[in-house]
Image (cartoon, rainbow, N blue to C red):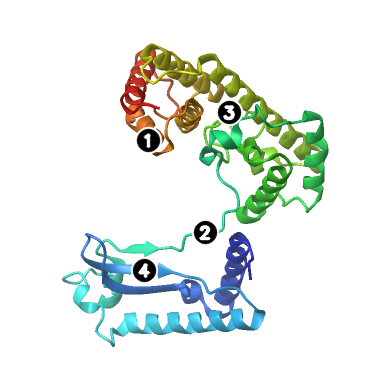
Amino acid sequence: MGTDWRLVDFWYDRMTEALVAHLGDWVVGWRYTVAMENYQDRGVIPLWRAQRPEVTTPGETLARLADAVVAWHELLVELSTDARGRFVAAAPAGVDGTGEPPAWRAVQGHGRITIYPAHQDRRLPYPSELSWADTDPRDRFFDPDTVRSAVSDLVAASELPSPAADWRLRDLWLENVSAGLVDRYGWWAVGWRWSVGEGEFDGGPVGSWCCFSHSVTTPEATTTAISAALLEWRHWLDDVAERFDRFLPLAADDLDGWERAVAHLVTAVGDRTQYESEWHGCCMTVLGWFLDAAGVASTGREDMIELAVAGRFDRWVEPSRAVVESVAEDLARRVAADGL
């Protein structure tokens, strides 16, 4: 109980492989159920649900898994015969030449939807979810000389997964490192993985880190890479704070001041992220921090930025100066209209 969802996922995948080896390919769907349901505005459609039993004691967990396998087998038998009359009426008209039972064709068509359980136990926020209060470095003492030792201890705390290891094991290892850094330095430290381009946290300002498959090698080299990434992230936050100080405080009706500040920050983020991949997500995060630092009410900040940007920033594209100035003008007007 309380096991991380990635380990539960991994364990169930291994159990499914064993079941397939013993019983055949049919058993692979053991965690699914299906029913014809009136779903939102789409009418009556096949609604598949995927759910794995809770992991508790070995005996209880295996019993639940066995019950799910039996239930799946019973569902497959029903789909081959439609003995309960639940599905055939929804089957496509005519014969499709596949030879499949009508009930099976019914649950495979008509815009079917599969609902997967959401994982609610994520321990750490994404960097884009941090507030300026979480990240503002000015009131947080930070000794860069402690980083190498702190990271070395975290890397040594558990064996490095191999590059070929399941992604969930690699992701959990990285999250454990991040959790250790957060415990040591504060929430801001989770941003060390927000790498430039298509890294683990897409479109960020960190060039010293990419992802597990590219940045994790030996314990010593991995310690070096993580340390450099954390220091680079902290330097970026220091740089952002210094840029904020150039413009703040700003009165809500100082349109010229707001336009200059926003245009400057968009360009600074773009240059740092090299306009790669989801760079605009990092840009909107920094603009949100700036509004926060300026005293704009939290209830309106996200909408202001979304409406000002309005799809004008694209992946892998440096916006023209005219576009940047237009976004800056739009956001300035929204701040003036709503006030501080």
Q: Is residue 210 visible?
A: no
> Of the numbered discs in the image, which one, if any, rests on residue 127?
none
For this orientation, the residue located farthest to the bottom is 83
What amino acid type is highlighted by mark number 3?
Answer: Pro
Q: Residue furthest left?
A: 93
- Residue 330 in percent (x, y) is at 32, 22
Disc 1 versus disc 2: distance between alpha carbons? 26 Å
User: Which quadrant of the figure has residue 242?
Assistant: top right
Q: Is residue 172 above or below residue 55?
A: above
Query: In percent of the image, x 65 and y 43: which residue is there?
Result: 213
Which marked residue is nearer to the observer: mark 4 or mark 3? 3
Q: Which residue is mark 1?
A: 300
Residue 265, position in %: x, y? Answer: 49, 20
Tell me which residue sits at (20%, 69%) in the image: 92
Q: Please report contact status of discs 2 and 4: CB closer than 8 Å, yes or no.
A: no
Label 3: element kind: loop
Tell me the distance, in whole angstroms, between the alpha carbons under discs 3 and 1: 26 Å
Please give the residue where the numbered disc 4 appears in the rendered image.
Answer: 48
Q: Which residue is mark 2?
A: 120
Q: Residue at x 63, y 41 (%)?
A: 187
Can you see residue 263? yes
Q: Residue at x 48, y 75 (%)?
A: 30
Q: Which residue is mark 3?
A: 205
Q: Secondary structure at mark 1?
A: helix
Task: Determine crowd level at label 2: few under 14, some 14-19, many 20+ residues with C-alpha closer than 10 A.
Answer: few
Q: CA distance from mark 2 to mark 4?
A: 21 Å
Q: How many tags in the picture?
A: 4
The amino acid marked with disc number 1 is Gly
